[in-house]
Amino acid sequence: MATADLLDRCAFPDGELHLGVSGGADSVAMAVLARVAERSFTIWHIHHGVRPGADADAAFVETLAAAWCVPFELRQLELDPGPNFEARARAARYHALPAGVCVGHTANDRAETVLLNLLRGAGLAGSAVRMQSAHRPILRLTRTETMAVCEEAGIAPCEDETNRDTSNHRAAVRLRVLPEIASALGRDPVPILNRHADLISDALEVVEAAAAALDPTDVAALRTAPRAVATEALRSWIQATTSDPYPVDTATIERVLQVVHGNHRAAETVGGHRIARSQGKLSISLASPNGQADT
């Protein structure tokens, strides 16, 4: 495989590039491809300050940038390794990176997210996995291809030891679930799951257009709307109002629909928020930091 042959499947944005490089094979391959494409770029690295190997990763990425004579920006985070660490780290990472940053997510990452979101009951939006928070120029490449890019460039990327910890749901999907599916079906599920996400994304555009015209707090309107449209209107409203990091799950929507149809007066969402009905309108009471909904 010649690295240059992969450029047709890359989607780098126009102008000066800002590349988020962790030191792993995917983000390093993204940087190699940008260099092969003769693009001008700055390398950004986020030091989460939690993993034992984080200092070595930062040094590796800085050395790589110096070898290529490209600008390097390091951002240090201070995170408590407590509950919801993955979601909090993601939010802090994107806050520290510049707008329009490019990240090295691949088709494998998207396939993993499809499965994780399906099992979380994240609905249409979760299944679409649009990944709109940043540019993902190598989303059509596979992890096998990014590793091959690094090998061809003579670069031995870093390896995050937590990626092999199958107590982490994503690692379990990557190392156990997807290989088992491949073995059972006799074919790679990654392209299938990516095509599924593309189809759902197309269908979701139609549903979103209808949902945007619907008042998500109007009980009568929600009752008469097609279920998919009412569901999307509620999902979008709850997500925007609560700003929770994970997509609103199906179980939450089901509970809220019970309120809409008069079976309950109120329902609790994931995160401890409370949605109540009064005089034909829905309202959200946001959870306070101690986990109780503010009244």
Image (cartoon, helix red, strand yellow):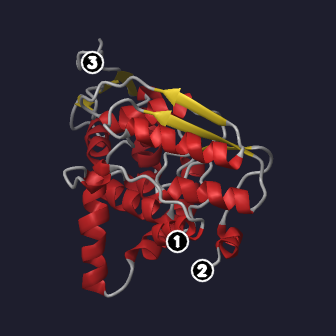
Instruction: Please give the residue where the numbered disc 3 appears in the rendered image.
Output: 293
| Residue 118 locus on image (x, y percent) | 33, 58
Spatial CA span between label 1 and label 3: 50 Å
- Residue 238 found in image quarter: top left
| Residue 290 locus on image (x, y percent) | 23, 15
Instruction: Please give the residue where the numbered disc 2 appears in the rendered image.
Output: 1
Spatial CA span between label 2 and label 3: 55 Å
Q: Is residue 268 visible?
A: yes
- Tag 2–tag 3 contact (CB < 8 Å): no
In what quadrant of the picture does the C terminus appear? top left
Foreground: 167 or 56? 56
Does 171 sit above or below residue 290? below
Callout 1 amino acid: Ala
Foreground: 47 or 211? 47
Instruction: Please give the residue where the numbered disc 1 appears in the rendered image.
Output: 148
Callout 3 amino acid: Ala
Outermost residue toward the top? 295
Element type where label 1 sits in the image? helix
Counting other residues with Cα less than 10 Å from the Cα at mark 1, is it few (<14), some (14-19), or many (20 or more)? some
Q: Residue at x 24, y 67 (%)?
A: 176
Does 283 sit above or below residue 149? above
| Residue 49 locus on image (x, y percent) | 38, 29
Count the marks. 3
Outermost residue toward the bottom? 186
Foreground: 38 or 53? 53
Q: Residue at x 70, y 56 (%)?
A: 12
Foreground: 101 or 113? 101
Q: Is residue 216 visible?
A: no
